[in-house]
Amino acid sequence: MWDGDATPKRRLVVVGNGMAGARTVEEILARDGGEQFFITMIGDEPYGNYNRIMLSHVLAGENAVDDDDMMLNPMSWYTDNGVTLYAGDRAVELDRFAKTVTCESGRIIGFDVLIIATGSHTFFPNMDGLREADGRLARGVFGFRTIADTNGMLQMATSRDHLRAIVIGGGLLGLEAAYGLRTQGVDVDVVHSPGHLMNQQLDEHGGKVLRNKIESLGVGVYTGKRTTAVQRTDAGKVAGVQFTDGDSLPADMIVVTAGIRPNVELARGAGLVVERGIVVDDQMRCEDEGFIYSVGECAQHRSEVYGLVAPLWEQAVVLADVLTGADPRAEYHGSRLTTKLKVAGVDVAAMGVKGPEREDDEFVQFYEPRNGIYKSVVVRDNKLIGAMLLGDVSKVGFLTQAFDEKVPLPEERISMLFDMGTPSAQTGAAELADDVQVCNCNGVTKGDLVACVAGGATSVAEVCAATRAGKGCGSCKGLVADIVEYAAGGSLTADASADWYVPCIPLSKPELIEAIRRQGLRSVSAVFAALAPDGEDAAAKMPLASLLRVVWESDWEREPGALFVNDRVHANIQRDGTFSVVPQMKGGVTSPEQLRKIADVAEKYRIPMIKATGGQRLDLLGVKKEDLPKVWADLGMPSGYAYGKSFRTVKTCVGTDYCRFGLGDSTSLGIAIETRYQGLETPAKLKLAVTGCPRNCAEALCKDFGVVAIGNGLWEIYVGGAAGAHVRKGDLLATADSPDEVIRLCGLFIQHYRENGKWLERTYDWVPRVGIEELRAILVDDRDGLAGRLQEGIDAAVGAYVDPWLDREEPKTNAQFTSALPLLPLPQVPVR
C-alpha cells in the first residue's frame, strides 16, 4: 500500500487496545513508525486506552472514570497520530495465511504485520452458584479488571445501605478491591486460600504485617479458606459463600480476584503455538512466524508470563525497535521484577527471592508488626538476590540499584535497611543511575525525568503530566519529586496545585475559606457547584465537610454522603463492624460515679471489652451501632472525640496535687484547656498534654500541643510533637507566665492551624512546614496583627460547641443508627 510518497507503507494491525498494545504503538510512533505503517488498533472496550491501575482509585472514590489520570490515550489521540481505532469491536478470528483479522461486527481487516496484545482476563474458579445457566456471572458477582467491572461494583455499593461484600483472593487486586469497597461504606471480608496475604510477593512475616494493616481498616481477613460455592437466594441473588470446611459467610456481593489468565483464544484458534501464553522469542515474534508478534500479559517468553506493567514496557521498547528498524537486533531477555506499589494505602516493595534458599545465604530481617513495618534482604555471594519492604520503603532506591548490581553492598548488611551509611532517601536522587525505573506503573526511568526537565519542564506537575510518572499507584511520587528537584536545580518552579486545599478547586485554603464566606456556601454540594470548574471529586468531600464546620460551626448544612461513617455516628468503627465509645475524662481525671456508670453500661449492653487508652481514658469496645444512642444516654457523659479529626484529649500528670516533684498544677490546667477547646474541628487529630515538671510523665514534649511546668509559675509550650509511627520532639513556641496565657496561646495556635493546615496534615508536619520562628512571630509577637482575629475565631468556635452525642435525641437521618450487624463474632474479654 502506498500513501503517495516513494516509500510504501505496510499495514500494521494491533489486536488489543490495552496498556501493552497502546504502549507499543506509542513506542513505534516515537521512532517515526507513522511514516512506515498504516496503524490499525482493535479494542473490545468502547474507550481509548486507560490505566487499569487507576481502577482501584476509582473504586475508592479518588478519581472519576474520565479523569486525565485514568485515560492514557483519549479518543482524540488516535486521530491526532493517524491511528485507526475500532473500539468496542472484539477480534474473533485470525487467518494467518490470508493475513486477515475478523471482528465480532463482521469487519475484516487485512495486515502485513500483526501484533497480538490481547492481555488477560479474570480467572473465575469453577464453583457452584458463580454463574447463571447461560454462563453469565450471577447477579452480584464481579471481576475487577475493567471499567465496566468497577462501575458495576460502584453502582451496587452506592445503591443501598448495609451492603456486605466478600472478596475472593487476597493478592494485590483483591486487597485493592476490598479497600475501595470499604471506603464506599461496604462491610468487606477477604477470603484467601493460602496461609497469608499477597503470598506471591510477601513472606509470612510480611503477610502478617499487611494483614494487621488491612484489618485496622475494618476489613475482615480469612486465610487458609478455600471457597467451594456461592450461595444464592430463591430469587437468584447472592447470599454468601461456602467453604471446604463447611463454614460459610454471608454476603450481598462477591468480587473474584483469584488471579488472571492470558487471553489466548484468538491465537490458539489460528494455530499459533500456545502454552500458558502465546510463545514468543527474544524479539517478541510468535514461534515459527515471520510477521506475527505478541506483547504483554498474553505473551509467554522463556516460559514466563508477566502480570506486572514494567516487563510490558520493556517488551514494547524491544518490539518497536525491531519493527521500525531503529535496532533490528534488539532483544528482550526477560525482566528482573522489582515491585513497588501501594496496597490499600500501605507502601510495599519486593524484588527477587522472598527468603534464603541455601544454607550460606545471608538473611537480615527487621520485624515490627505493631508499627506495620517489615524489612528483609537476602544476600548470596555478596550480591543482593532478594528484598522486601513493607510500611517503610525509604531504602527502595538503593536496594533497586543493588539488586541490579549497580552499586556495591555495604559490609554492614543492616545498613541496607536503614540509613547507616548507604545512600539516604534524600541523596538517592542524585546517585540513582539513569536507567533505574522510578515509576513501575508507567515505565518511567530517572533518565526520562531528567530528559523532561532538560526539555523545558520546570515543575513536578509538568514532568508528571508529560511522563505520567506518579500517575499509577502513587508510591513513587516522593522520589519523582526528589529527582525533578535534583535535575532542575535552581530553575524548579512551584506547582500551583500544590497549594490547593482540595484537588478539584483551584484555591488555597485561606482563599477557599474567603470564597465560602463571601458566597455563603454552607454545604459540600454548594461548594462543588460554585467553585469546582470540572465538577465534584469524591476525595474532596471529607476535607470540605471539615472546612465548612470550621467556617460555619453548627450552621453548616450536613450532607451524610460527605462524611465518613465515624463522623456520621460519632464513634470509631472497628474491624468487626461494631464501634468503640470513649467518654470524656478531662485531664484523665475520673470519679467513682463515672466509673460506676461505665461498668453498669458495659454490663447492660454486654460490651465485650473495656480498655484504658493512651490518652488516659476508658474505651468501650464492641458497641453495636443501634445501641450507640442508648449507651450515650445511660453514660450521661460527653463524647471524648476519639473518632474525629478534631481536638482529642489533654493528658496530664498529677502535678502539685500529690507529686513530690511537681512545679505546677498540671491537672487543673489540663482540665481547663480541655473544657475550653473540647471537640473543635481541626485538619487532623490534635493530642495535647500538660506535665507538672520537666520529668515529663505526661509526655508533653511529643504532643501536638504540650505544656511543661518549669517552676516560678512559668510554663514552656511545645508544638508539633509526635510519638506514633513518626517520632518528633515538639518545638518551643513560648514560655508563658500564667495558666491563662497558656490557654490563650493554645487557642491562637489551634485556630491558626484550623485555618491554614492541609487536610490530614498533623501538626508535626505543619509546624516544620510553616517554621517555628514564623509561628512565634504570628502567634506570640503578633507581628501581622492577626492575634485579635484569631481570638475572635476561636471564641466563636468555642461558643458554638454542641456535644455530638446529643444526636441520640434527634438522629440526623433514619439510617444513622440502624443495625449493621452481625458481621463477625464479637471478641470476648480475655480471661487472665
Image (cartoon, rainbow, N blue to C red):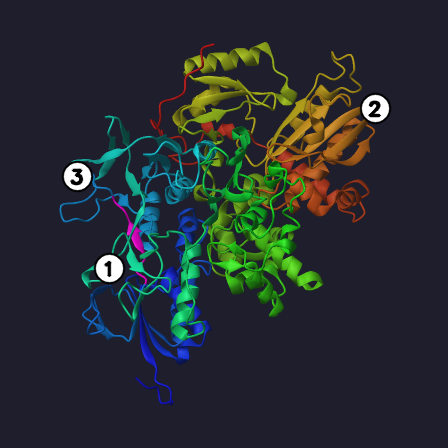
User: Dot 1 corresponds to which residue?
Assistant: 273
> In the image, 328: left or right of 86?
right
Where 17 sits versus 524, above or below? below
CA distance for labels 2 and 3:
74 Å
Q: Amino acid at mark 2?
A: Gly
Q: Residue at x 58, y 60 (%)?
A: 434
> In the image, 658: left or right of 373?
right
Q: Is residue 120 magenta?
A: yes
Q: Residue at x 71, y 47 (%)?
A: 770
User: Dot 2 corresponds to which residue?
Assistant: 713
Where 605 sits versus 58, above or below? above
CA distance for labels 1 and 2:
86 Å
> Which quadrant of the structure image shows residue 185?
top left
> Which quadrant of the structure image shows residue 741?
top right
Which residue appears farthest toward the right when viewing the image? 712
Question: What is the span of residues highlighted in magenta in the rendered image?
Answer: 117-124
Answer few, some or many: residues within 10 Å of disc 3's Cα (few below 14, many 20 plus, some between 14 and 19): few
Labelled disc at residue 195: none
> In the image, 199: left or right of 463?
left
Answer few, some or many: residues within 10 Å of disc 1's Cα (few below 14, many 20 plus, some between 14 and 19): some
Labelled disc at residue 235: 3
Give residue 443's position: percent from left, percent from top: 48, 58
Query: Could you tell which of marks 1 and 2 lies nearer the N-terminus?
Result: 1
Give residue 352's position: percent from left, percent from top: 46, 45
